[in-house]
Image (cartoon, grey):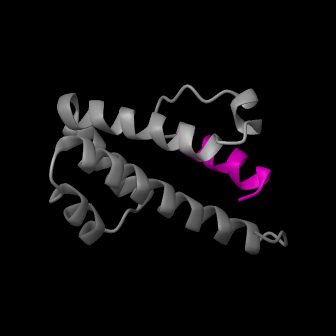
Amino acid sequence: MDQEIYNALAADTSKFFVLDTIEADLYVENFFEQFRKRLSDHVFEMLQYDYNKLLIILYRIDVDEKTVRNCLEGSGIFNVADSLADAIIERLIKKINYRMSHSGRNP
């Protein structure tokens, strides 16, 4: 993934989640792993304390309902949070690639 996609991913995610993703973080070699961990931690918190809001966010991001169900059927809340974070990232990257391809930029 290139820097432009990382920037867009951080920006898009910040619309839905309060993540501590500062610009400097985007230039580290393992940005994606750090970003995924932060998102997973945030999803974990929402699973415990704000489940309904999490479902609304998943709907707004347009994560497929079947994908959400499959993630929620996972064993253990940590695995569920990781799976949901992966599904969120996958969906946002698809949206970013679509936007970029329709704006004349190559994803």
**In the displayed structure image, the side of residue 73 where residue 1 appears, left or right:** right
Quarter of the image for the C terminus: give it.
bottom right
Between residue 46 and residue 1, name the one nearer to us: 1
The x and y percentages for residue 20 are 55, 25
Quarter of the image for the N terminus: give it.
bottom right
Residue 65 position (above or below residue 13): below
Residue 67 position (above or below residue 46): below
The x and y percentages for residue 28 are 73, 36
**In the displayed structure image, the side of residue 103 where residue 31 appears, left or right:** left
Magenta highlight: main SS = helix
At horizontal 39% and vertical 40% (from top left) the residue drawn is: 40
| In magenta segment, residue 105 | no
At horizontal 62% and vertical 49% (from top left) the residue drawn is: 9
Residue 90 position (above or below residue 13): below
At horizontal 48% and vertical 63% (from top left) the residue drawn is: 91
- Quarter of image, res 62: bottom left
Q: Check the image and name the residue furthest to the right.
A: 104
**In the displayed structure image, the side of residue 66 where residue 100 appears, left or right:** right
The x and y percentages for residue 48 are 18, 32
Between residue 51 and residue 30, name the one nearer to us: 30
| The magenta segment | 1-13
- Quarter of image, res 78: top left
The x and y percentages for residue 71 are 25, 59
| In magenta segment, residue 9 | yes
**In the displayed structure image, the side of residue 46 where residue 36 appears, left or right:** right
